[in-house]
Image (cartoon, rainbow, N blue to C red):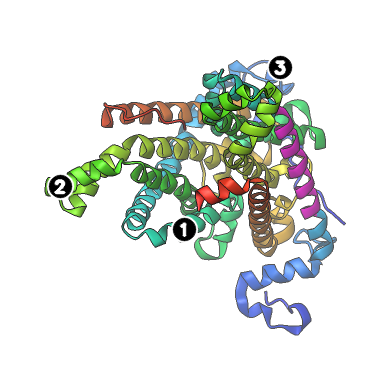
Amino acid sequence: MIAPGVAGLPIGAFGLFGDAFNFVFSGREAETGGVTVGGTGQVIDLATTQLEVTVFALAVAIVLAMPVGLWLGHRQKGEFLAVSAGNAGRAIPELALIALMAAAIGVGMVNLVVALAILGIPPILTNTFVGISQVDRASVEAARGMGMTEFAIVRKVELPLAVPTIMGGVRTAGINIIATATIAPLAGILTLGDFIIARNVYGDAGVLAGAVLVALMALALEGTLAAIQWAMTSRGLKLERS
Amino acid sequence: MIEPATSFAAIDQSFFTDRSGGGCIQENKLFCPGWVVDNYDRYVDPTLQHLVLVGSAVVGGFLIAFALAILAHRHRFLQTPFLAGTGILYTIPSISFFFLLLPITGRGPLTAIIALTAFNLQIIFRNITNGLRNVPPNVTEAATGIGMTRSQVLWRVEIPLSMPEIIAGLRIATVSTVALATLAVFANGGGLGTEIVSGSNITFKTGIIVAGSIAVIMAIVFDGVLLLTGKLLAPWQRKRVIT
């Protein structure tokens, strides 16, 4: 099928990629007939949902995992727990987690965010622990000698020095979460993954458009988190690295 | 405007009627051991397919990443572009990657293997380059001093000393790939995912639990085997590596 294209451009000439491009910008009849699918309206709708669940889940994961990692790292305790949590987290099959969550507990936003947050917790916990516990103990002792409280040591000494490692964990978590948010339609929340999963509705053009959009969103999220990391890293650490 | 996806909620009755286990299956309880006993054979093929997907992706990813790391070790200026390039491949979600390949390789295991390989590159590449970089300079200088050529230093000194990091990278890559390969079902790539989304039905809890558990066990076994391999290849254990 040759698509007419946006603004008269001969987009059909680019094959399926052109057709997918066209799918994003102008609606068309669904493969199943009847309703109109695709077009900027639906794309923005689904992309917004995907971003929302990703940000929610990442926030929940940070709030739950980071304090534990900070505390364990500061006390230099629980290395086995923190590191094995990271290893175990990688072994969780995302698809099974989402499917089981949806089947056993039910579909919906809250359950989805919980399932996605579960995927985000291990890398944040492990990296926060590793980052904090690898801070030079001499610096910590010096801070203690200056009369800093334990809380101040964490906040003013350990945390700034561990920013690159901690943010590494947050970035891994973010990538995992946004990638898994793609299969959220299985849990009843329509994200851009709907284009990919429901091929019978959107056709191959929709599938490819969904794939491109998801890839772009993941790269944009990674870029944003990298920029946040850069902004949070102290000048001294940046000089040391370059 | 937004149409619901295919109705995953609709349970395919034929899937259950011929299954044993009393009322457990009909009521779709959380876990029906009776069904598993009678149906374990249906997990054999998906498990084997899963092993092929993971094996190919990890071996392929290792070979490519190893070549890239050796190149970047010889020519330091390549390190940044290689890291950035593999970083992009790592960031693109696998499920999206499957379908970016759709116009090129279509649907099937090959598509899934390519996407999973691309995902692996960064993890393995970064660990190999870190390992090579962490070899103490005095060791390589001593090796040069006793008359080793550059490639002898690389193959007989630097790579063996980097073994703990290389194995650590392979462990992370393998475990992650075992979990990710469940998504291959969306690319018609087979694997354990077929038993999770069996017959457009993702509400059958026992099936999800069995397939998910096989994946987790597979990840643990691979991890253990690589851990032992690492111990054998680097008996001195230069230092502890936190993965």
Residue toward you, A173 or B12: A173
Magenta span: chief secondary structure: helix
Element on which disc 1 rests? helix
Could you tell me how far apart the alpha carbons at marks 1 and 3 are, in whole angstroms? Answer: 60 Å
| Type of the residue with mark 2 | Gly
Q: Secondary structure at mark 3?
A: helix
Q: What distance separates the C-alpha of mark 2 from that of mark 3?
A: 76 Å
- Which amino acid type is shown beneath numbered disc 1? Thr
Give the image location of residue B209, x and y in percent. Answer: 61, 26
Write down the chain letter for disc 2.
B
Q: Nearer the viewer, residue B100 or B122?
A: B122
Mark yes or no: residue B149 visible.
yes
Eyeballing the image, is A124 above or below B90? Answer: above
Q: Which residues are magenta?
A: A46-65
Q: Chain of mark 1?
A: B
Asked where in the image residue A149 lies, by quadrant, the reply is top right
The structure residue drawn at horizontal position 69% and vertical position 20%, both measured from the top left corner, is B30
Q: Which mark is residue B145?
A: 2
Q: Residue A42 is drawn in which quadrant?
A: bottom right
| Residue under disc 2 on the same chain as residue under disc 3 | yes
Q: Residue, x 51% and y 38% (percent of image)? A: B176
Tell me which numbered mark, 1 or 3, is placed earlier along the sequence: 3
Residue density around tag 1, few if under 14, some if 14–19, many if 20 or more, within 10 Å: few
Q: Which residue is mark 1?
A: B80
Q: Disc 2 or 3, which lies upstream in sequence? A: 3
Please state, as top left, top right, bottom left or bottom right, where the N terminus of chain A lies in the image: bottom right
- Dot 2: element: helix
